[in-house]
Amino acid sequence: MNRTQQLLRSSALVLFLFGLNKITGFGKLLLMTAQFGAGAEADAFTAANQLPELFDTMLAGGALAAALIPVYSGYLIRQQRTEAVAMANTVVTLTLLVMGAIAGLAAWFALPLTRYLLVPEFSPEQQALTADLMRILLLSMMLFSIGSIFSSLLHAHQHFFTPALGTVLLDLGQIVGLYFLAPYLGIYGVAWGSVIGALLAWGVQVPAFWRVRVADRLQIAWRLAGLHEVARLMGPRIVTLGVVQAVDLVFIRLASPLPTGSIAAYYYALLIMVGMPKSLFGGAIATVIFPTLAEQYNRGDRSALRRLVEQSLYVVWALVVPGAVGLLVLGPAAVAFLLQRGAFDAEATALVYLLLAIFSVRLLGETTQDILALPFYARHNTRVPMWVSVGWAVVNVGLCYGLVGPLGIYGLALAATLAVVAATVALYTLNRWESGGFEPARLGGNLGRILLACGGMSGAVLGIRQLDLETVPYLVVAISSGGVVYGVLFFLLGGRALLGQLAPTLPKRLIVRQREGV
């Protein structure tokens, strides 16, 4: 089995667990919308999560992970075991100290941060609720940050199972909070469920962490050369992720005076259209290929690196584009079937569906960005993604201020989508300049074939809509028919080559021998 096939097998495993994670995540979404709808408590919880997410993404879960894997992987390739263990010990120790200090300070100043920074337009009661929820979520952030470092180190050892399983347990903890705690504690039960989930996600990785012997004690090896390299790489990455999170804070501030439920509806739509498919497909594939890209760069195999990026883009597009198009052509009936129950009414359904339509383009852009950024990180170049993110933030914030007045929450969604498109084009162009190896004709042809197959799928679904079926039969017939049409057209238009690459990852009884050996 060659390396590409091994990566596809690992991707299949991670995709399965990420898929399970999306099922649990969707269950969490259904419980959240049914109990809290798009109301004031849901808005408060969404706002309270912004700063903890910012701290985790900027420091542990995002910036440190992207800087750590290439350097740590280099130690493993050079068989410098002592240095690798010292690096792991140091990173875990510093994460505990830094994130603990940040969580403590943010919890102490939670109310003024909420009142003057996050949601100045909320009522005093809603601001106090937001601050209380933030204090609980900061504890979840602490646990999740340690789990993120464990995941990154295990990924460098090509161990993907328990980190992916942790994402499932994270959602299960939140479901426990929603189902068992929320009836007694209200929205506070959801926050404590996040703490339970983060604890489970960290704990499930501990056995694998010790079995691989990634780290063995608390230690700070200040003189370790790799630590200085990680710090150097983290700087631009912190800026990159910091501006992303800063834009979210600007969004929360601009959206706080909009009608009640606007913030919650925005994030529900973002989760359905972008968050779930992006992490399921783009995130799973990026997770698997990044350690290999780092290895290929460290070995000097630039052509293999470029081929892997192109193949990954094709796979991601083939998976996310039909899902986005399919959800749109199914119409508001799909959103109503999924979400419209309990506190989630028809008005909220219409709001979320229109936001989904805007976010469909954002999904393609963000999943493409996730892959296109990896070659830069593998080459120890964190500055290019940083400047692209800064440009994205400037465009996004400018458009937000310009569009929120006339278009309200839709203007904020459109601003984010247009900014993502601009950033994706910039990343692709800069990748071509630096690597010189991407083939625009091949990439464009792959995307074009996928869009043609989606066109046929859309025609089939729209035809079924004319039959005036009841909601459940309509959705069953439309989804199954649309899926078959897309699959057949994709295969006929060139997807056979992709299936040939995926074949070694499938059970032998499912593999059909192909005479042409694609």
Image (spheres, rainbow, N blue to C red):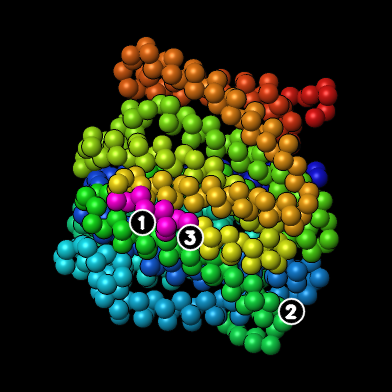
- Mark 2–mark 3 Cα distance, whole angstroms, equals 41 Å
User: Residue lying furthest bottom in this view?
Assistant: 223
The N terminus appears in which quarter of the rendering?
top right
User: Label 3 is placed on what type of residue?
Assistant: Ala
Q: Is residue 169 visible?
A: no
Secondary structure found at label 2: helix
Foreground of the two, 7 or 347: 347
Q: Is residue 451 magenta?
A: no
Name the residue: 26% across, 76% down: 112
Q: Nearer the viewer, mark 2 or mark 3?
A: 3
Task: Work out whether residue 418 can be spotted.
Answer: yes
Identify residue for label 2.
Answer: 82
14 lies left or right of 508 = left
Pointer 1 local density, CA inside 10 Å: few below 14, some 14–19, many at least 20: some
Numbered range of the magenta stretch:
393-405
Q: Nearer the viewer, residue 165 or 272?
A: 272
Q: Which residue lies at the image location 48% right of the left edge and 61% below the top edge?
A: 394
Dot label at residue 401: 1
Residue 398 shown in magenta: yes
The residue identified by callout 3 is 393
The residue carrying pointer 3 sits among few (fewer than 14), some (14 to 19) or many (20 or more) residues within 10 Å by Cα, namely many
| Looking at the image, residue 83 lies above or below residue 311 | below
- Quadrant placement of the C terminus: top right
- Crowd class of label 2 (few under 14; some 14 to 19; many from 20; radius 10 Å): few
Q: Amino acid at mark 2?
A: Thr
Q: Is 82 placed left or right of 124 in the picture?
A: right
